[in-house]
Image (tube, rainbow, N blue to C red):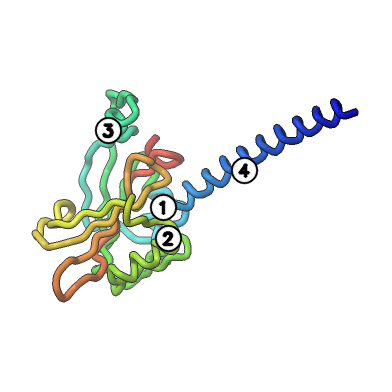
Amino acid sequence: MKKQFGVYTFINKQILSISMCLLSFLINIRAQNNESVSMLDVSIPGVIIVGSYTQLIELQGKPNSSFFSTVNPINPRCTKECGIVSPANKLQCEYLIYDAFEYLHVGDSVQLVFVDLRKTDLSVYIDDLEIIKSLNQNKFISKISKKGWWNYECSEYKIGKIESHYCTNTDVNCFHLDYTEDPYSSVIFTFYNTFFNKKIWWIEFPIMRIGGIVH
């Protein structure tokens, strides 16, 4: 009887150990998901986030301008970091430029990739986080810290001059948050970094390479 009891105890301990490992694994996955920004959680009233080209034109009209380019289905950084060889072929795409918004157009699909908060009074919602043109840097950091998106020791931010989209040589702070749809890219929030202005300027969303219009 003692032997049987010992066997049962051993089995119960093994089951408990496996259960704890599984629970830890699930918690870790959930934590990782909570620490990244997903395009599926982004919404702007009256603005297409991801959809068809037809829907975009019907809702927001024709773009002010556009230009053609190519995109690689796999982020080039992945070649160095995980050894995946980028495919030789590139996808033909078109960038559609509106006053405050920029889209990537592939086939009949479009995805929002850029928002200039200076040029719109609309709110950008990411999950339950509301971002408006008057949002200042300190309040933004406080909000994303509470959501688990920001860690001063591990998260990335850059202080410098503007380098993309606008060649104004303006002092800015760029905050890079992990992106669910492409683990090798970041959602970039850019703030003015002048003495009188610490408000948000623009948001850049990477291409959705996981479950998006580029695979």
- What amino acid type is highlighted by mark number 4? Leu
Ranked by sequence position, the earlier of labels 1 and 4 is 4
Res. 76 mark: 3
Provide the residue designation for mark 4.
23
Provide the residue designation for mark 1.
37
Name the foreground residue: 36 vs 49: 36
Provide the residue designation for mark 2.
126
How far apart marks 1 and 4 lie (CA) works out to 23 Å
- In the rendered image, residue 192, in percent from the top left (x then y), is placed at 19, 66
What residue appears at the point 18 percent right and 57 percent down from the top-left corner? 159
Residue 5, quarter of the rendered image: top right
What residue appears at the point 32 percent right and 43 percent down from the top-left corner? 185
Dot 1 alpha-carbon crowd within 10 angstroms: few under 14, some 14 to 19, many 20 or more: many
Please, what secondary structure does the residue beneath circle 2 have? strand
- Is there a contact, CB below 8 Å, between mark 1 and mark 2? yes
- What amino acid type is highlighted by mark number 2? Ile
188 to the left or right of 214: left
